[in-house]
Each structure stands twice: as structure tokens, then as C-alpha cells.
Amino acid sequence: MKRFATVFGLAIFIIGTLLTFGVDSEPSSSEATNNEKIIGDARETFVQIRHSCELKVCKIKKKKKKKKKKRKKACVTKNGATTASGFALEVDDLGTFIMTAAHACNPDYLIERTLLGAMEAGMPLSEDDDVYYGIDINVTSLSGKEHDAVIIALDKKNDMCMMYVAGLYMPTIGASARMGQIGSSVINVAAPTGLFDVNMVPAFEGVYNGMLAVKDAEKIKKLAVYSIPASGGSSGSPIISSTGRLTGMIVSVNGEFDSISYSPTALTMNKFFNRTIKKIRQCILIL
């Protein structure tokens, strides 16, 4: 009898445990609906950014003639391009303010990448060469429409860039100046490796892990750390809290583990955005 009671009690415990944990093993319908809404809203604010560069390298050749030497240029053209992610933060009467990572819209970065690509392709370069380049930057919304963009502000230290796209009108993300609780769930909408098409952009679920202090030019800056998979093309993509507010933006990944992503803090992003908008409005008032 004692043995029967022990076995019976163990069975009740196991059944109770299974029932307790089994109920929460799947997300509730309200949680799933909330995530669907957050992803749906974020998709509408998303843009893919394409930064292209045409590089022309001209070498001077000397052509010998009987009486005089003539200088002749032999030119080789190299094209380069990078893609990144971005999102709409504010719309006015003329267009939309787009935010992304600074390295995704910095012309120097693209020129350097294109030059390296030219050298890797076997194009010999020297200090005596004449180098010409043309830069073009545009954004594509989920509808597939492409628009030219203008860079209006760069914060290289915190890897943030603000662009303006005239003639583009789209929904915006509401920004938060506060980070969420450690362990809270977040949503990321991005175009890793350029994976993007009309009405198609990947979405990822992640977790906020806390802050990381990083030494930068003898100063300490803080980065928010997220468990979000990312790769080239994810830079500048929004990180959104469970309340649907912007809380971060992917600017880099851990070099040894690409499921850990880094972002400026929500407060840093908020200050950059407000400062940029304030300066733009002051310039408009002066004009």
C-alpha cells in the first residue's frame, strides 16, 4: 500500500508538471497577434539602401615620338555597391527622414571598399594614378519604388546616419528614449545579404541582453547587446520593442558569433534624431 501511494503521488506530480509547462510551451494567441502587428507595421516603415560607386583609375602612359613625348591616359573602370537597411522616422510635407548606420551611407567607406575590390581583382594602383569616382545612394521601399536619397547628418562615433528622401511618403516608427527590461523580447526587420524584394523583407525575433561598455578613442561608450542573427545588409535595421516602439538599430555583429548584434542605446539614437530635426527646422526658418 505504501508503495502504491508513492507511485500514485509521483504520477500526479508528473502529470501536474506536464500540464503546468505544457500550457506555456506555445505562445498565446494574443502574443502571436501582437508580434504579427509589430512586424506588419515595421515592414511598412522599412527601406533597403543601395550605395553604388563608379571608380575610374587612369594611368599616364608616355608615348615616344621623334620630336616630342606625348602623355596619354589609359583608364580602367570599377563598379562597387553595398546594401543596407533603414527605416522611416519622420515625414514632412516634402518627404521622409530615413535613419540607418553611418558606415552604410559614408562615401569614404564605399570608395575604400571599391578600391580594395579593384586591387583584389588585379587592378594595379599607384600614387601617380588619377582616380575619379561617382557616388549614388538610393532607397527602395517595400512597394519596390526607388528614390534618390540625400545624406543630411552623420554620427561616425555612434555609427548613425540620417538621410532625407524627397517625394517619398510612408509610415514611421515611434521612437523610445528608454531601453527595455533585460530579457525582454524584440523584433528586427532587416535585409541580410541583400535579401529583399517587393513585399518581402525578413523579420527576426530576439532578446535584449543588456549594455556593453566599449572603449572608443580613449572614451567609453555603451552599446546595447541583442540576441539577433545578422550579416552584411542588416546594418541600419530597426529593433522594435514588444510595445511597437523603436528601441535600437543594428550597427555591427560579434565577429565570432553572428547571432549577437550591437546597437546604439535608445537614448543616443533619440538625441541624434531630435538634434538633426531641430537643425533642419532652424535652417528652414532662416531661409
Image (cartoon, helix red, strand yellow):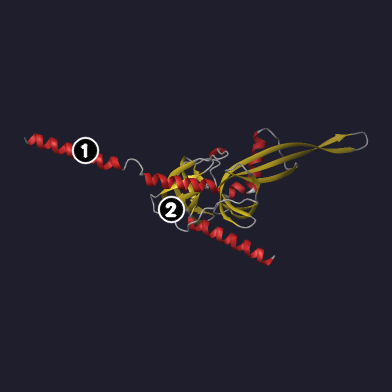
Query: Position of 253 compared to 52: left or right?
Result: left
Q: Residue at x 10, y 37 (%)?
A: 5
Question: Is residue 25 or residue 183 the one in the foreground?
Answer: 25
- Amino acid tagged 2: Thr
Query: Position of 271 compared to 132: left or right?
Result: left
Question: Is residue 145 or residue 110 the one in the foreground?
Answer: 145
- The quarter holding residue 58 reads top right
Relative vertical location of residue 67 with respect to residue 271 in this rendering, above or below: above
The quarter of the picture where the N terminus appears is top left
Assess disc 1: are there few (<14), some (14-19) or many (≥20) residues with their C-alpha within 10 Å of its C-alpha: few
How far across and down, in percent of the image, does residue 144 sit?
A: 61, 41
Mark nearer the N terminus (2 vs 1): 1
Secondary structure type for disc 1: helix
How far across and down, in percent of the image, does residue 284 sit?
A: 66, 63
How far across and down, in percent of the image, does residue 85 sit?
A: 56, 45
Q: Residue furthest bottom?
A: 286
C-alpha span from label 2 to label 1: 35 Å
Q: How many marks?
A: 2
- Amino acid tagged 1: Ile
Question: Is residue 39 or residue 155 the one in the foreground?
Answer: 39
Instruction: Give the residue pinned by disc 2.
Output: 243
Q: Residue at x 49, y 58 (%)?
A: 267
How far across and down, in percent of the image, does residue 212 sit?
A: 44, 52
Query: Position of 236 compared to 56: left or right?
Result: left
Query: Position of 189 compared to 146: left or right?
Result: left
Q: Residue at x 34, y 40 (%)?
A: 26
Secondary structure type for disc 2: loop
The quarter of the picture where the C terminus appears is bottom right
Q: Residue furthest right?
A: 67
Assess disc 2: are there few (<14), some (14-19) or many (≥20) residues with their C-alpha within 10 Å of its C-alpha: few
Instruction: Give the residue pinned by disc 1.
Output: 15
Task: Check contact, mark 2 vs mark 1: CB within 8 A.
Answer: no
